[in-house]
Image: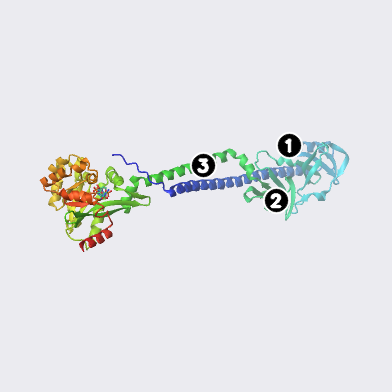
């Protein structure tokens, strides 16, 4: 038998849970992406500033080396030998573009222009001089120096002076194309004073006045000479543009992971809510409970017993026996279910002292548990054997019942004091064979026969024949599903002993059933 298709009302919380979990993963993914992007941005600014500082260090180191060497040659004037020495040094240099020679603080020759016709005085005090090492070098930024060689082209340069020589560094030499940061400034720092050397002016000040986001900026000074520093600003959008593909791929992955997570949660919730898993869980978490429907003597109208019927309710709603009974069979949990039923029902009935002894309590038993011999453990349940009630086992007609094995089991059950009732008579298999082979005490006429009475249908017309069989085999007979007085009268006339149905009471919880009994005993 297939699992019945059960269309449960869509749980409104489910869509919210799915959206929230997908949204949470998306937010988490974006947060992680932003975190790592931020880390990468910080690392990029750091590596850019380290690169710039290494350039600055190399430039300063080259300048000191060149100027020291030239000064050590001790030329006292600019002659061919001095110019040759200067040009050789320039040839070897990486950063320097021109070297000049001073006599009495007046520039008299340069590598580019040779001997000057009009010597130029230089203002030594303009240079920034490291107070701790005054003899070393002085340095100065010229925003638009017209080099004597290229008078029409002003250059942004650094002029570095030591002794009788100066050296010109084009500030663009620090501007390598391999760094990502477009906005950087190299400066010389002495106490609180900053002297711009290269790059964009004002970057340092903007950073200090918090014009930029913290992780977009970096200020670092050289390890070799703490006075030379770099300030740089790498804006988000530039960084993003540089890593666009990486970001887009990461973002798509985050979206995919979020959607997958939402789908997984959806799948998980659907499975949780599927009937099978609800039933499995329900057995463990006590979502099954049992109700009691009165059975009355049709002649006297007195209650003689009850049928115990299972109910199911969990957070997702109610399942009817028509839904859970076939599934319990399908997943082979019938016996576990029956054991829980017996435990629960015994506890409930034992706590109800006012119930009269001898009350017939009908318990539904699965035919497959008969076939598998599980019912043989019933006589070992002390609560059942010592009960003050008459325990009647209702077994639905089924193909399993038609077997010699079942016959043996039934014999044992009867010898142990159980009453046996053939349930739903008229709806199952090989009715007459079962009646003949298996020793039942009672026969229960299915409610479809009773409901047929109003329309005088074929089934209703068969009731007298059923009663003939009942009398022949010496059974008692219960008719189930009695709703009207008309049905009751006809069944009574047909000789049916007992009746069960809404006319006498719907299946009810134990407390209600106790009150029902108390009322009917009065
Ligand atoms: N229309 C109508 N219906 C009435 C009337 N009086 C009683 N009924 C319903 O008829 C069914 C009688 O139970 P059943 O024939 O043993 O048939 C039961 C029984 O075969 C099975 N079942 C229920 N509980 C258990 C259980 O604990 N164990 C086992 N093995 N089967 C159970 O599920 C079947 C259906 O149970 P329920 O849905 O509870 O349906 C019950 C009951 O609620 C009435 O006047 N009119």
How many neighbours does mark 1 have within 10 angstroms: few (below 14), some (14-19), or many (20 or more)? few
Mark 3 secondary-structure assignment = helix
Residue 181: x and y in percent read 66, 43
Instruction: Work out whether residue 142 or residue 289 is closer to the camera in this orientation and state it.
Output: 289
Mark 2 secondary-structure assignment = helix
Res. 431 image quadrant: top left
How many neighbours does mark 2 have within 10 angstroms: few (below 14), some (14-19), or many (20 or more)? some
Instruction: Work out whether residue 36 or residue 369 is closer to the camera in this orientation and state it.
Output: 369
Q: Nearer the viewer, mark 3 or mark 2?
A: 3
The residues bearing labels 2 and 1 have C-alpha atoms spaced at a distance of: 38 Å
Instruction: Work out whether residue 302 or residue 360 is closer to the camera in this orientation and state it.
Output: 302
Residue denoted by label 2: 206
Q: Quadrant of the N terminus?
A: top left
In the rendered structure, find residue 258 and report the number of the disc placed on it.
none
Q: Quadrant of the C terminus?
A: bottom left
Residue located 77% across and 50% down the image: 128
Ranked by sequence position, the earlier of labels 3 and 2 is: 2
Query: Is 166 on the left or on the right of 177, as rendered?
Result: right
Ranked by sequence position, the earlier of labels 2 and 1 is: 1
How many neighbours does mark 3 have within 10 angstroms: few (below 14), some (14-19), or many (20 or more)? some
Query: Is 314 on the left or on the right of 304, as rendered?
Result: right
Residue denoted by label 1: 92
Mark 1 secondary-structure assignment = helix
Instruction: Work out whether residue 460 or residue 228 is closer to the camera in this orientation and state it.
Output: 460
Query: Is 506 on the left or on the right of 183, as rendered?
Result: left
Q: Residue furthest right?
A: 118
Ranked by sequence position, the earlier of labels 1 and 3 is: 1
Residue located 11% across and 47% down the image: 471
Asked if the residue under mark 3 is in contact with the one under mark 1, i.e. CB atoms within 8 Å, the reply is no
Residue 274: x and y in percent read 36, 45
Residue denoted by label 3: 255
């Amino acid at each position: 038998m297939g699992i019945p298709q059960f269309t449960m009302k869509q749980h409104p919380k489910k869509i919210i849970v799915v959206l929230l979990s997908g949204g949470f993963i998306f937010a988490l993914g974006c947060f992680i992406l932003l975190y790592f992007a931020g880390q990468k941005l910080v690392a990029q600014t750091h590596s850019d500033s380290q690169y710039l500082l290494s350039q600055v260090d190399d430039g300063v180191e080259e300048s000191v080396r060149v100027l020291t060497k030239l000064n050590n040659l001790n030329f006292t004037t600019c002659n061919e030998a001095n110019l040759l020495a200067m040009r050789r040094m320039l040839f070897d240099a990486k950063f320097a573009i021109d070297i000049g020679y001073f006599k009495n603080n007046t520039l008299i020759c340069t590598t580019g222009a040779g001997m000057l016709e009009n010597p130029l005085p230089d203002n030594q005090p303009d240079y920034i001089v490291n107070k701790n090492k005054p003899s070393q070098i002085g340095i100065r930024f010229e925003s638009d120096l017209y080099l004597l060689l290229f008078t029409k082209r002003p250059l942004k340069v650094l002029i570095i002076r030591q002794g009788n020589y100066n050296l010109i560094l084009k500030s663009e030499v620090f501007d390598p194309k391999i760094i990502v940061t477009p906005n950087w400034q190299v400066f010389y720092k002495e106490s609180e004073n900053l002297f711009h050397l290269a790059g964009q002016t004002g970057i340092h000040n903007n950073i200090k006045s918090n014009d930029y986001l913290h992780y977009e900026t970096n200020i670092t000074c050289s390890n070799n000479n703490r006075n030379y520093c770099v300030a740089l600003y790498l804006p988000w959008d530039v960084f993003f543009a540089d890593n666009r593909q990486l970001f887009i791929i990461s973002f798509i992955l985050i979206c995919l992971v979020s959607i997958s997570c939402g789908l997984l949660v959806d799948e998980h919730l659907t499975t949780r809510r599927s009937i099978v898993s609800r039933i499995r869980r329900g057995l463990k978490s006590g979502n099954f409970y049992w109700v009691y429907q009165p059975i009355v003597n049709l002649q006297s109208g007195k209650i003689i017993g009850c049928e115990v019927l299972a109910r199911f309710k969990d957070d997702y709603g109610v399942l009817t026996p028509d839904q859970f009974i076939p599934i319990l069979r399908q997943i082979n949990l019938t016996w576990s279910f029956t054991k829980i039923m017996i435990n629960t029902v015994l506890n409930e009935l034992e706590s109800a002292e006012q119930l009269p002894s001898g009350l017939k309590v009908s318990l539904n038993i699965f035919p497959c548990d008969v076939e598998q011999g599980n019912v043989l453990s019933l006589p070992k349940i002390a609560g059942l054997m010592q009960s003050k009630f008459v325990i009647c086992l209702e077994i639905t007609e089924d193909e399993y019942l038609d077997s010699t094995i079942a016959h043996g089991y039934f014999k044992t059950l009867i010898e142990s004091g159980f009453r046996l009732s053939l349930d739903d008579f008229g709806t199952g298999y090989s009715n007459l064979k079962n009646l003949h082979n298996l020793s039942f005490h009672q026969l229960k006429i299915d409610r479809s026969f009773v409901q047929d009475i109003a329309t005088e249908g074929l089934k209703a017309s068969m009731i007298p024949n059923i009663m003939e069989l009942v009398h022949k085999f010496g059974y008692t007979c219960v008719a189930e599903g009695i709703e009207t007085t008309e049905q009751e009268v006809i069944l009574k006339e047909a000789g049916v002993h007992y009746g069960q149905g809404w006319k006498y009471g719907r299946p009810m919880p134990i407390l209600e059933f106790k009150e029902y009994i108390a009322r009917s005993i009065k």
